[in-house]
């Protein structure tokens, strides 16, 4: 017999002393020494470097020169190679490097032992069922547990179906009112989405100059070259879609999307943005991608519908690990120490938005979901009083670490930013949040009508 959910936790059986501490809701004083022990980590990551999200035949009309062709990582026979958005050879290598870093970190923390076959029994990997996320998860496993045998990554089959964790609307777990979705986004824009072109005029101007090959400072700007389509001139509208369609903003995002991947995939400077972009320029253009995802996945109504299910599973999994009792709607088992969920930037954006989480890493715009980057939730236990705490951070390779395929070690780690959890975090350097408080916050932000509350495969 299992507990029904995180919201009825501890309703069954006598409580252990450590579990009683979960009810302590007072703020912790800032501690000069971290007395906590890591009990579980949940890594909610984006796939690594991929090709352009749209086929080159679709995006080439946006530019004066053809876009580059990315070398695809060889997929297993059971996973067909898509025409666009496939994981690159370097993307797979970068994800293995990243997994190797987590191996070092989690072994140093005592969560892993270094005995890969034994550790694999306490690890749960699940990815969205598209080629780039499956291969990223498998590559991450290879880096984290190199001697554990073939990667054990679960994903929903057939691949034409929707995964309830990452696409609850498509899977029928949640229902999105399309008209309400449009109204919710329009309401954030004062009913005038076209105003975004003016608000982000520098980003629009830089995008156009890169696409058509002229200095951004050139005045007047030249007309679009013959045979091209000016993505920056397409009107910005908000209409029904998946979850909404934002007209010209989406087109600009598709046109600029390859530039991050070009640099991250290691292309020489002469080929990134046809030789016109550096890291600062890439970061500036990435603000448009972050803007589109913010509207589509952080708008409160859309966010609650699209992200409540995965949020519910994440929180239930931490409660399950803390109590040692099976909890319905969790991932893995009560003894699972590492949970890795590999999906897309939109999924991470949505989960972060639901809890109002923000981060900023060097070389990236605020709240940007970089290739391979992850929201990381650590379940820790105080050795002083037994209380369970949640510590959140965002961890990602820097643009140069991606570009150079840099080795990662404990002394040369990826970039990391501690994350403050509103309504929950205490005032210490790592913004720790008592688990009981985190559960309370989760109850406030998760829409139970959009959460399936059922177990995944264990």
Image: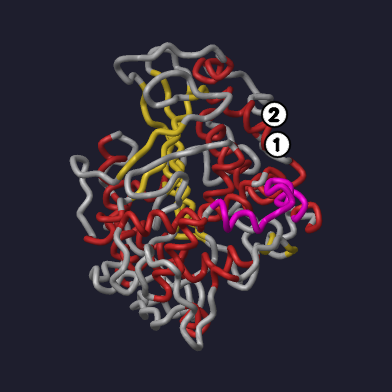
Horizontal side of residue 247 vs 229, given as left or right: right
- Whether residue 450 is visible here, answered yes or no, is yes
Residue 99 locus on image (x, y percent): 32, 53
* Vertical position of residue 361 compared to residue 253: above or below: above
Pointer 2: what residue? 8
Horizontal side of residue 107 vs 419, given as left or right: left
**Residue drawn at x 53%, y 31% as measured from the top left:** 324
Horizontal side of residue 305 vs 393, given as left or right: right
Q: Main secondary structure of the magenta part?
A: helix
193 drawn magenta? yes
Say which of 109 and 83 sits in front: 83
Q: What stretch is highlighted in magenta?
A: 182-199
Q: Which residue lies furthest to the front in this view?
A: 220
Q: Which residue lies furthest to the bottom in this view?
A: 227
Residue 4, disc: 1
Residue 403, disc: none
**Number of marks:** 2
Residue 108 locus on image (x, y percent): 25, 36
């Amino acid at each position: 017999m299992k507990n029904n959910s995180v919201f009825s936790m501890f309703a069954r059986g006598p409580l252990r002393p450590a579990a009683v501490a979960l009810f302590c809701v007072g703020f912790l004083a800032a501690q000069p020494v971290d007395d906590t022990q890591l009990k579980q980590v949940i890594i909610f990551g984006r796939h690594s470097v991929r090709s352009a999200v749209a086929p080159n035949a679709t995006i080439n009309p946006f530019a004066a020169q053809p876009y580059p062709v990315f070398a695809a990582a060889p997929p297993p026979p059971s996973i067909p190679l898509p025409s666009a958005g496939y994981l690159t050879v370097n993307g797979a290598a970068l994800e293995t490097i990243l997994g190797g870093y987590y191996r070092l970190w989690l072994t140093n923390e005592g969560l892993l032992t270094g005995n890969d076959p034994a550790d694999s029994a306490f690890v749960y990997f699940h990815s969205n069922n598209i080629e780039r996320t499956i291969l990223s998860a498998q590559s991450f496993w290879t880096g984290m547990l190199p001697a554990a045998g073939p990667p054990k990554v679960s994903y929903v089959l057939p691949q034409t179906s929707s995964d309830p964790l990452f696409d609850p609307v498509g899977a029928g777990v949640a229902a999105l009112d399309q008209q309400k979705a449009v109204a919710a986004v329009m309401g954030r824009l004062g009913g005038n989405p076209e105003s975004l072109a003016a608000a982000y005029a520098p980003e629009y101007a830089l995008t156009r100059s890169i696409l058509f090959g002229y200095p951004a400072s050139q005045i007047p700007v030249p007309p679009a070259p013959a045979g091209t389509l000016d993505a920056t001139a397409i009107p910005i509208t908000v209409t029904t879609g998946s979850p909404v369609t934002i007209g010209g903003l989406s087109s600009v995002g598709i046109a600029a999307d390859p530039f991050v991947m070009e640099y991250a995939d290691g292309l020489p400077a002469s080929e990134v943005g046809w030789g016109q972009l550096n890291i600062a320029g890439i970061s500036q253009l990435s603000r448009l991608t972050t803007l589109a995802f913010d509207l589509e996945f952080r708008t409160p109504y859309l966010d609650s519908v699209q992200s409540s299910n995965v949020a519910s599973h994440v929180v239930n999994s931490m409660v399950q690990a803390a109590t040692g009792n099976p909890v319905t709607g969790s991932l893995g088992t009560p003894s699972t120490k590492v949970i890795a969920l590999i999906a897309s930037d939109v999924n991470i954006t949505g989960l972060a938005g639901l809890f109002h989480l923000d981060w900023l890493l060097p070389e990236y715009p605020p709240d940007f979901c970089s290739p391979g980057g992850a929201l990381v939730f650590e379940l820790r236990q105080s050795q002083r009083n037994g209380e369970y705490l949640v510590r959140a951070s965002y961890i990602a390779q820097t643009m140069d670490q991606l570009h150079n395929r840099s080795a990662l070690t404990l002394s040369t780690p990826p970039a990391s930013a501690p994350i403050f959890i509103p309504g929950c975090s205490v005032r210490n350097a790592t913004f720790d949040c008592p688990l009981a408080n985190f559960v309370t916050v989760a109850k406030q932000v998760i829409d139970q009508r959009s959460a399936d509350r059922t177990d995944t495969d264990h």
